[in-house]
Structure formats: structure tokens, C-alpha cells
Amino acid sequence: MNAERSAAVVRRWVAAYTRGLPAEVRRDRADEIESDLWSEIADAAAGSGEGAVGKDILVRLLLGMPADIRWRFDQPPGAPGPVPTVGDPTMYARNISMISVIGGAAWAIWIAPAILFGDNAWVGTIGMITMFTLLIGSLGLSLATLGFVFGNIDRLHGIASLLGAIGGGFGLLLAGGVYWGMVLLPVGSAAVMWNLARLRVVSSKLAWAHAGSSVATSLLALPLLTNLIPPASAGVAVFVLLALALEGYALSWIAVGWSLRAGTWMQEEPATT
């Protein structure tokens, strides 16, 4: 990814976590980040190489997410304003719920060929389907996790927000081969869902189902990623259990998104008189 595209990702992240703050605070933060981006892109133009700088920008983005979230919590809430007719909180909530359903469905699809065909699942026509659904699934569930975090950022516990942001960030990299997202994304989304259940946004049954499948997915994927159980020597039972956990995780996302499809989980800001 070149430097300009990486910078665009950073700008969208800044717009997301400063949402709801006073306009001058958002502008000052955006200007601060823009100054840093300008310096890094200038280095690329001076000969560092756009590809290398683009990767550096993304790495700094991921490493800086916890500090960004902590900065957001330290800011006083913005003054309420009129609810816009397009892109209002309810529409935002509906979009996140829809993304949850789409991401969960795509996540459920890619698992089947990956388990049934093994290495052959990543070549030819089947490989295209597997990669496409993995991409849509990982992006969808990561964006949904981040969406729930920032849609409830003033109500979630700080630890839940932090875990959700980290999990969502690593989940975005999953389709690119950063398989730690398969461990960290479930952990982050489970923390968020558990907190949302305490706020009565989702039912306790859905939160339990999501947390159970998340823990199972992480515990089964972790020894494979750390080579405690080499994939080549892992038995069929290990992969079958992992597939069941992944499918359960996907179905829990579909259930959560469908239960929240009305968009009422995110309270609208009161209009000014």
C-alpha cells in the first residue's frame, strides 16, 4: 500500500474516534495527525520509498490505537447538536448491524472449503471463493467490532474498548496473512459483546454464545499459531473442533446483527431547541 492510501486509512480512523467531540477539538486533532502524515509522506518523496513509508504509517496506526482511545476517553463530551437527516446515529447503528450479518455469513462460508479441501482450498476457482469470503468476513467482523466500540464509546468500559479496538485492528490484517487476528479478533469482540450485554444492548444468551465461541476459537487457534501444535502434526479432531468454533463464532455474529437490525441500540442525540 502506498503512502497516500495509508494516510487515507489514518484519516478515517481519526474521524471515527473523534466522532461526537466539539468541532474545534476534532479539527485540532486532525491537524496534529495531518502534520505527522505530511512529514512521513515528505520522507517518501525524498527517497525513502512510498511502499516502505506506507507500511510504516499502518504500523504506527495500529501501535497508536490504544493511545488514541485513551486520548478519546480523556476528552469531555461534545455539546449536543441537531440530529442530521442522513448518517444519523440510527442509520449508523443499522449499517453496523448489517455489516455484522454480512461479515458473519462470509466468515461462515470460507471455513467450509478451507476444512474440506485443505491446501487445495486456496488455488483455482475454489481458492478465489475462499479468499474472497475470508476477506469480506474478516473486514466485516473487524469493522463491526470497531463500530460497536465507537458507537458506544461513552458507555463501554475502557478495557472492553481497548480490547475491541486491538481485536478489530488485527482482524483487518487477517486477510493479509496476519493470522493473529484469528485469536485477537474473537477476544476483542467477546469483551465488547459482554459489556454490551451488561448495558442490555444485546441479550445475555447471545453474549454467552458469542463469548463461548470466541474463547473456543482463540484457544484452538493459539497453539497452532505458536507452533505448540505444529499444523502438520495436528490431528483431524483439532481442525474439526476449530472449524466448529469458527462456525459458531460466525453464527453468533449473524444472530447479534439480526437482533440489532432496527438500529435502536444506539441512542440518538437530542436535537437542540
Image (spheres, rainbow, N blue to C red):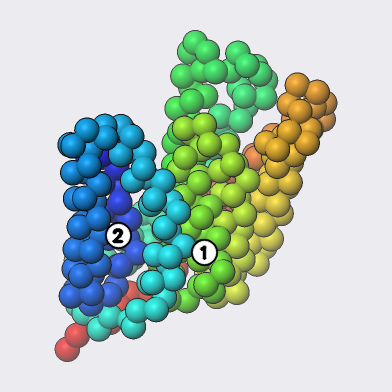
Q: Could you tell me residue 271's position as x and y percent?
A: 22, 81
Indicate the secondary structure of the residue bearing disc 2. helix
Tag on residue 38?
Answer: none
Task: Give the x, y percent position of residue 71.
Answer: 38, 72
Q: Provide the residue designation for mark 2.
A: 14
Location of residue 97 in the rendering, given as x and y in whole percent from the top left corner: 44, 55
Depth check: 37 or 234 in front? 37
Q: Secondary structure at mark 1?
A: helix
Front position in the image: 1 or 237 = 1
- Residue 112: name its quadrant: top right
User: How busy is the neighbourhood of tag 1: few (under 14 within 10 Å), some, or many (20 plus)?
Assistant: many
Examine the rendered structure and indicate whether residue 199 appears above or below residue 13: below
10 Å crowding of disc 2: few (<14), some (14-19), many (20+)? some
Up the image or down, 128 lies above or below 60; here it is: above
Q: Amino acid at mark 2?
A: Val
Res. 264 image quadrant = bottom left
Q: For the C terminus, give its image quadrant.
A: bottom left
- Residue drawn at x 44%, y 36% as measured from the top left: 136
**Image check: 235 left or right of 140?**
right
Taking the image as drawn, is residue 22 in sight?
yes
Cα distance in 3D space between marks 1 and 2: 16 Å
- Answer left or right for 37 relative to 227: left
> In x, y percent, where is residue 133?
48, 30
- Residue at point 23%, 38% (across, down): 44
Residue that badge 1 annotates: 162
Quadrant placement of the N terminus: top left
**Do the numbered discs 1 and 2 sit on residues whose CB atoms are within 8 Å?**
no
Task: Give the total of numbered labels.
Answer: 2
Q: In the image, what residue type sits under mark 1?
A: Leu
Q: Residue at x 23, y 74 (%)?
A: 25
Nearest the eye: 227 or 100: 227
The residue under the point 67% across, 57% down is 211
